[in-house]
């Protein structure tokens, strides 16, 4: 797997509220601009999404892909892996939540590694990952804090 990129943001909300927005994958098209459609294909015994198909349109990058999710029992992290995709050969990601200020604010760390079917220079790939993470974290912050 390719080298991972990591980025963090602080959100003015407790971890459980943030994780509930992250876990509501069917609502992503409402607030994640590049996500056109999501479909939960399978849920785990805990009722959380286990496999989800995404339709992505990020300008020059369009893809339909399926991710497999692993939700931490403590509600502070989720990891995912690519099951299949058209433009991607591999994807590994994670949201890690760390409570701050007695749980009233939360540091959210997003780790992402994407390997495309077409080869891409490492520097360009990392730049694209950072842009994806920056956008995703800002949209997540706006969604969570806007739900007040």
Image (cartoon, rainbow, N blue to C red):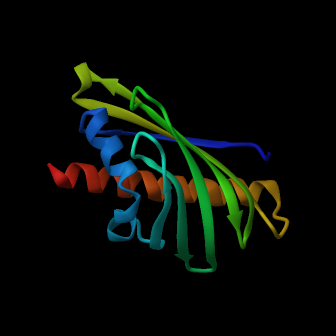
Q: Along the line of sight, which residue is nearer the eye, 110 or 26?
A: 26
Count of residue discs = 0
Seen at 54% across and 73% down, the residue is: 56
Image spot of residue 99 (x, y percent): 33, 25
Residue at figure coordinates x 69%, y 43% from the top left: 4
Rendering coords of residue 68 (x, y %): 59, 51
Q: In screen coordinates, is 88 left or right of 8?
A: right
Q: Is residue 108 above or below residue 126?
A: above
Residue at figure coordinates x 74%, y 60% from the top left = 124
Front residue of this view, candidates 2 and 76: 76
Q: Residue at x 18, y 53 (%)?
A: 147
With respect to residue 62, does 95 lie above or below? above
- Look at the image and tell me in which quarter the N terminus lies: top right
Residue 120 shows in the view: yes
Q: Position of residue 73 (x, y in %)?
A: 43, 28
Residue 36's quadrant in the figure?
bottom left
Residue 139 position, x and y percent, is 37, 58
Q: Is residue 114 left or right of residue 1?
A: left
Q: Measured along the vertical axis of the image, is residue 15 above or below residue 127?
A: above
Figure quadrant of residue 46 = top left
Left or right: where does residue 141 sit relative to residue 32?
Answer: left
Residue nearest the viewer, comparing 39 with 80: 39
Residue lying furthest left: 148
Question: Farthest residue toward the front?
Answer: 45
Q: Is residue 114 visible?
A: no
């Amino acid at each position: 797997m390719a080298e991972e990129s990591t980025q963090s943001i602080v959100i003015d909300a407790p971890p459980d509220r943030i994780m509930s927005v992250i876990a509501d994958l069917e609502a992503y098209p409402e607030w994640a601009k590049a996500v056109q459609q999501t479909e939960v294909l399978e849920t785990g015994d805990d009722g959380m999404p286990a496999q989800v198909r995404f339709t992505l349109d990020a300008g020059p990058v369009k893809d339909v892909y399926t991710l497999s999710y692993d939700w931490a029992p403590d509600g502070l992290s989720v990891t995912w892996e690519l099951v299949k995709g058209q433009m991607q050969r591999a994807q590994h990601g994670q949201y890690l939540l760390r409570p701050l200020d007695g749980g009233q604010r939360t540091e959210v760390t997003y780790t992402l590694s994407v390997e495309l079917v077409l080869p891409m220079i490492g520097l360009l790939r990392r730049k694209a990952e950072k842009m994806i993470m920056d956008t995703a974290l800002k949209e997540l912050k706006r969604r969570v804090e806007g739900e007040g």
